Amino acid sequence: MYKGKKLLIIGGTGTIGQHLLQELLTHNPEVIRIFSRDEYKQFEMQQQFQEYRNIRYLIGDIRDAKRVSRAMEDIDYVFHLAAMKHVPACEYNPFEAVKTNVLGTQNVIQAALENGVKRVLFTSTDKAIAPSNTYGATKLTAERLISAAQYQKGPKETVFSSVRFGNVMGSRGSVIPLFKKQIVEKGRITLTDGSMIRYMMTPSQAIQLILKANEIAQGGEVFVLKMPIIKLNHLAEVMIEEVTKKCRINNKVEIKEIGLRPGEKRYEELMTEDESRIASEIEEMYILPPPYGAKNNSYQGERSTNHYQLPNDSEAIPKETVRKWLIEEQLI
């Protein structure tokens, strides 16, 4: 699908962007453009991938519609990963989150239509379901913009779709690098709530499902990845055990619970009860149809969804599986 094609990764210097770049390079595309506003991160990527001659680095911000359109010239496929995603930062600066996550997404949509892009895949979050914070609310709005673009595009042939997933292990700003830093430097870690559960997956798992969703998208859908559930206290315990062993730390590491942050939920959901009534599913993901038109889409292996339920502790993966994933992904 990507061999000989021209690809654009918006927000390409982030954790998911870097893993996506590594995977897409194996498909031999003609060019991959990395679009982000962080010049230092781009410099680091240039050093890491300096042997590749088909990567281009563009400084820009999705708030700048003209720059986004310029970056999208002659592009076949767009992966829209850019976002303001830190929950407390979005709570404290809500309109900044709107400008990036909502207005920025509309800029991406408009640029794709103007430049005749074949496909646009938007990455959303489980926090968009029944949002309790600004981040989730802006991501939900962006999801709706992407779905609306599919039926408002007129004769344009661009296929718009979204993929919804939870936390990615080791991503920038996530708890894993934070826990590691706290263990080494402070001898304790801060945990919002030990009983909290989260949907969490490895970067490799996330990338494979993102690409699968982009390949089967027919327009306007939201693909909801079937993600494993992890108990935060299991994650904290594994991090303490492995980091203290690796760094030869003999002192006991304390776990301090600090309570939920503003806008934070005790548990997340994959979709709402109403969405589950209209969703279908394939082996790796649920599929929410677009709200208007294109409701006769069909997918290989598709079946009706009749067993979706809210997450609970009993579904959490074993602690040793958490350890295995962290070691395999070289996150500790």
Image: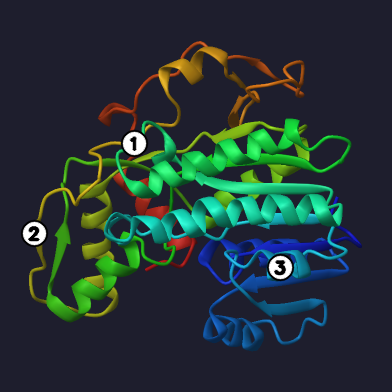
Q: Which mark is residue 256?
A: 2
Where residue 243 appears, as percent x and y from the top left, is 27, 71
> Mark 1, mark 2: which one is toward the viewer?
1
Read off the residue under disc 3: 66
- Kindly identify the residue that appears in the image at 63 percent across and 22 percent down: 291
Q: Secondary structure at mark 2?
A: strand
Asked if the residue at tag 1 contacts the one at tag 3, i.e. Cβ–Cβ closer than 8 Å, the answer is no
Q: Hey, what amino acid is under mark 2?
A: Lys
Report the residue marked by disc 1. 268
Residue in the foreground of this view, choosing between 198 and 40: 40
Name the mark nearer the viewer: 3 or 1.
3
Figure quadrant of the C terminus: bottom left
Q: Are marks 1 and 2 in contact (CB under 8 Å)?
A: no
Q: Say which residue appears at 59% left-offset and 31% top-offset.
A: 285
Q: CA distance from mark 3 to mark 1?
A: 36 Å
Under circle 1, the secondary element is: loop
N-terminal of the two: label 3 or label 2? 3
Q: Report the disc number at residue 26.
A: none
User: Which residue type does callout 1 highlight?
Assistant: Glu
Q: Estimate the x, y position of residue 233 in percent, counting from the top left.
A: 20, 48
Amino acid type, label 3 = Lys
Query: Which-is-in-front pick, marks 3 and 2?
Result: 3
Disc 3 and disc 2: Cα gap in Å? Answer: 47 Å
In this rendering, is residue 142 above or below 293? below
Disc 1 packing (10 Å; few <14; some 14–19; many ≥20): many
- Residue 314 horizontal side relative to residue 61, left or right: left
Q: Earlier in the sequence, mark 1 or mark 2?
A: 2
Q: Nearer the viewer, residue 320 or 35?
A: 35
Badge 2, how many Cα within 10 Å: few under 14, some, many 20+?
Answer: few
Secondary-structure class at tag 3: helix
